[in-house]
């Protein structure tokens, strides 16, 4: 999608069209999440501190992030693709996916006509534009999607690798970040072509297994398998950004509980439980001028004894990890992440008496316990569950499970303060 977060706001608020607009929180330490194409004319891009963006553009409009809005549009876009074109989708992020069109493009006479039809349908139903990269494997398709933005269609075929891909600066290569770029340039690897022609063992010694993969990609060798069965969320995380740094342990514990509650709600929407709870904090003295320092965080995680979607279990684990992690300084950000997820319906773990007693699986204690025990004894574990659970699970479109409606991932502590005041 083109400037996705910004365009979502423009689609719902026409006043913002053709304005110099960025998406960012009002916090003075914030950075730009994304910028409209108008703002990009001032060299304002994602990751730039908001004070710097204001220096570059006097009439800059700052719009608060709305992750529920982005999830809504994301869901609509993936539904359009899966219902009108193909279900062979691999979701790469909230605004990007790989699509295998091997078996459908001929219906449209050409691949380009198919891509044009997709762009038209997405714009007709959402008001958003997208750019499409087309090739014979995922890396090459990803590499050319930015060639013709916004609302463009680009091809990068194997025969064009040397003339089109190789001259590009190494920083433009997918999965090459600031640190990797520095390593490459210190070793006189300045373009993708330089990497492709380098000795593979030398690159592997520099970067390990990742170097091995990047070397293959630079030579156009990559996977062409669209993994359309792996679109379930792998982790669930939420964060609070504090407008005023705090070292008040009661306030911090309230935030941890709110974050755990949000994670429980999001896990229940997806019919999943988790076994690993991680805590992340950022201190007041973080350097927000340097984006590399901005990304530096302090984290600790703990593995639970069993899979859970219980908020008290999350809170107890997160509070303990925070206590071991925190050095007493004022913090700017706190985040909680649930990982090592498992599906409730397809979880084949034995249902224990403890689970039944705690009603953790949604079964009524008095009427169904004995029947469940008999069913488990005869047919094995977790073969019975409520019909309503199964219907809800089946009704959930797994391809959209990453980005469900009303599914904020980042919460301002302004919202928490309003809640406390109420």
Image (tube, rainbow, N blue to C red):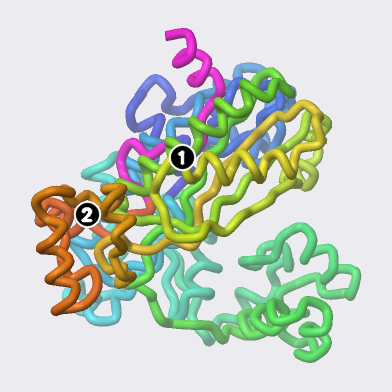
Which one is in front in this view, the residue at disc 1 or the one at disc 2? Answer: 1
Other residues around mark 2 within 10 Å, as few (<14) / some (14–19) / many (≥20): some
Q: Is residue 120 above or below residue 371?
A: above
> Which span of residues is magenta-colored?
403-422
| Residue named by callout 2 | 396
Whichever of callouts 1 and 2 sits on the residue coming sooner in the sequence is 1
Quadrant showing the C terminus:
top left
Q: How many marks?
A: 2
Disc 2 element: loop
Helix or strand or loop: what does disc 1 sit on?
helix
Q: Position of residue 176 (x, y in %)?
A: 69, 65
Q: Which residue is at the front of the view, 407 or 319?
A: 319
User: Which percent across, then down, holds residue 278?
Assistant: 60, 50
As drawn, the label of residue 312 is 1
Q: Is residue 384 above or below residue 260?
A: below
The furthest residue to the right: 186
- Horizontal side of residue 329 vs 349, given as left or right: right
Q: Position of residue 66 (x, y in %)?
A: 43, 31
């Amino acid at each position: 999608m083109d400037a996705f977060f910004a365009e979502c706001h423009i689609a719902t608020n026409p006043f913002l069209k053709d304005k110099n607009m960025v998406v960012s929180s009002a916090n003075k330490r914030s950075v730009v999440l994304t910028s409209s194409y108008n703002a990009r004319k001032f060299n304002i891009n994602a990751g730039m501190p908001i004070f710097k963006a204001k220096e570059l553009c006097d009439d800059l409009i700052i719009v608060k992030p709305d992750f529920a809005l982005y999830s809504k549009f994301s869901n609509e876009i993936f539904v359009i693709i899966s219902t009108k074109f193909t279900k062979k989708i691999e979701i790469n992020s909230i605004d990007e996916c790989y699509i295998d069109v091997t078996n459908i493009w001929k219906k449209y006479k050409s691949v380009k006509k198919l891509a044009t039809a997709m762009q038209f349908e997405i714009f007709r139903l959402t008001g958003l534009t997208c750019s499409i990269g087309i090739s014979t494997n995922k890396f090459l398709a990803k590499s050319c999607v930015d060639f013709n933005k916004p609302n463009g269609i680009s091809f990068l075929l194997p025969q064009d690798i040397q003339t089109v891909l190789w001259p590009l600066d190494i920083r433009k290569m997918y999965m090459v970040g600031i640190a990797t770029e520095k390593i490459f340039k210190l070793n006189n690897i300045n373009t993708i072509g330089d990497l492709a022609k380098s000795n593979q063992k030398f690159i592997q010694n520099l970067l390990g297994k990742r170097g091995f993969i990047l070397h293959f990609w630079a030579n156009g060798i990559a996977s062409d398998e669209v993994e359309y069965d792996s679109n379930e969320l792998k982790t669930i995380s939420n964060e609070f950004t504090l407008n005023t740094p705090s070292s008040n342990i009661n306030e911090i514990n309230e935030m941890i509980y709110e974050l755990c509650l949000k994670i429980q709600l999001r896990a229940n929407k997806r019919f999943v439980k988790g076994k690993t709870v991680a805590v992340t904090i950022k201190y007041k003295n973080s350097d927000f001028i340097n984006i590399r320092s901005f990304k530096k965080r302090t984290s600790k995680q703990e593995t639970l004894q069993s899979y859970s979607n219980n908020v008290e279990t999350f809170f107890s684990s997160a509070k303990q990890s925070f206590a071991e992690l925190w050095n007493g300084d004022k913090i700017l950000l706190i985040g909680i992440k649930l990982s090592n997820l498992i599906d409730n319906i397809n979880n084949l773990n034995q249902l224990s008496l403890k689970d039944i007693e705690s009603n953790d699986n949604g079964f009524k204690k008095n009427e169904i316990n004995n029947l469940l025990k008999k069913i488990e004894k005869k047919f094995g574990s977790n073969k019975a569950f409520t019909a309503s659970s199964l219907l809800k699970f089946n009704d959930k479109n797994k391809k959209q499970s990453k980005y469900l409606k009303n599914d904020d991932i980042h919460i301002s502590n302004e919202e928490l303060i309003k809640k406390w005041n109420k």
